[in-house]
Amino acid sequence: MSTISPLDMAFLLLENATRRMHMTAFMIFAKPKGQEKSFGPRLVEAYRASEAVRPFNFKLKWLGKGIATWETVKPDMGYHVRHLAIPSPGSMQQFYETVSFLNTSLLDRGHPLWECYVIDGIEHDRIAVMIKVHHALIDGEGGLRVMRNCLSDSPRSKRLAAPWMAFGPAEKTRRPRPNVSQMQKLQAQLKRLTRLPGDLIGIGNDVIELGAQSLNLKPRMTSLPFTAKPTLFNNTPKSAARAYANMELPLDEVRALAKTTGTSVNDVVMTLIDHALHQYLREQKAPASQPLVAFMPMSMRDETTGEGGNQVTVELIAMGAPAANIRERLQQINAATQSAKAKGRGMQKLRARLMRWY
């Protein structure tokens, strides 16, 4: 069995019918020539015959109120891998409606907290692989890594690999844990749960720094917790229904803009989102009087880290001023994210030193 960190436990304890804590990602592929009808069933068969490794073979085991651990099980691949088809004509609008529907329900805690959907019938002989996984099981960066692991760089490769089949070299490089009893670990975990708000917003040891900022004793580098002005976006969902929409941007143009302005692709995308949100609020006649605040997770993983769970820190980033033009907004967001990244790099170095000492 493996203990669940306080942050991972928080994603479980805070979840309810209208506040889901799972993530979803999908990839759309063109089917191989001559396999338009056979490729979907063949892919599903390969996925169901595969073996899931950690953390995809972890199942929740509750040991008491608010205390749980992961137990290693053999997942029922027939349950976890589903095959469905969109009815003709298989438009992208139909696909987005299907994704929205599949995201409505909670993951079944009687199984490992993930599901895979092979979605067939998309127009132009395409097929999608959609993964739905709980945030307590793995974080966004870890999820991207396992998705990337199942892809091949060679068009000659015929292997049908799944994200849950391999997780990287971490199993060989992990250091042994001290021989501490399971109950001692759980008791320590319970004590740490009382400090969840600090863990959740990623401030932990930064409380003193944030306090100094609130007293204007030093320049403001991050946004203070719970100080963002309420907007139309700060409402608690009253329904489990969700809607998915999609917009595509030409990556080469975004990269060119980032290079020209000395910013990053992430800064450019955040600027466009921030600009659109302010425009939406103005159209709803409820404009924001202060910058919106973004909840920005930053990965603390290194190249050897392949285990599950959440290995992130979080910064609250003040976005652009409401009246800023698009160029000013980009500069303001870039300054805020650069400050956050510098702080994150310092924390990652500290974590690496602590891990070596540990």
Image (cartoon, rainbow, N blue to C red):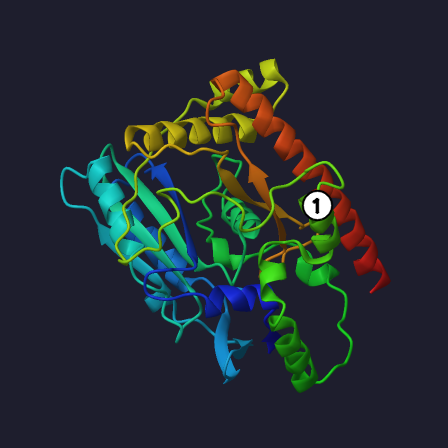
Apparent side of residue 165 relative to residue 116 in the rendered image (left or right): right
- The picture quadrant where one finds residue 280 is top left
Q: How many labels does the image show?
A: 1
| Image position of 173 with respect to 120: above or below | below
Position of 250 with respect to 281 (left or right) is: right
Q: Position of residue 109 (x, y in %)?
A: 40, 73
Secondary structure under badge 1? Answer: loop
Return the residue nearer the eye: 350 or 84. Answer: 350
Q: Which residue lies furthest to the right in this view?
A: 357
Q: In which quarter of the image is the C terminus?
A: bottom right
Q: In this view, does 81 lie above or below 266?
A: below
| Quadrant (top left, top right, bottom left, bottom right) of the N terminus | bottom right
Using the rendered view, name the quadrant where residue 96 is placed: top left
Residue drawn at (54%, 16%) of the image: 256
Q: What residue is rendered at 59% in x and 54% in y?
A: 201
Q: Nearer the viewer, residue 164 or 3?
A: 3
Task: Using a 10 Å C-alpha cutoff, classify the residue at mark 1 as few (fewer than 14 neighbours), some (14 to 19) or many (20 or more).
Answer: few
Residue 10 lies, in percent from the top left, at: 52, 66
Res 308 seen here? no
Q: Residue furthest top?
A: 260
Residue type at numbered disc 1: Leu
Q: Is residue 141 left or right of residue 349?
A: left
Q: Which residue lies furthest to the left in this view?
A: 88
Please tell me which residue lies in front, 124 or 60.
60
User: Label 1 belongs to which residue?
Assistant: 215
Give the left or right position of residue 141, taking residue 108 as reference. Answer: right
Residue 350 visible in rendering:
yes
Compared with 280, 293 (above or below) is below
Q: Where does residue 39 sit, x and y in percent of width and height?
A: 30, 46
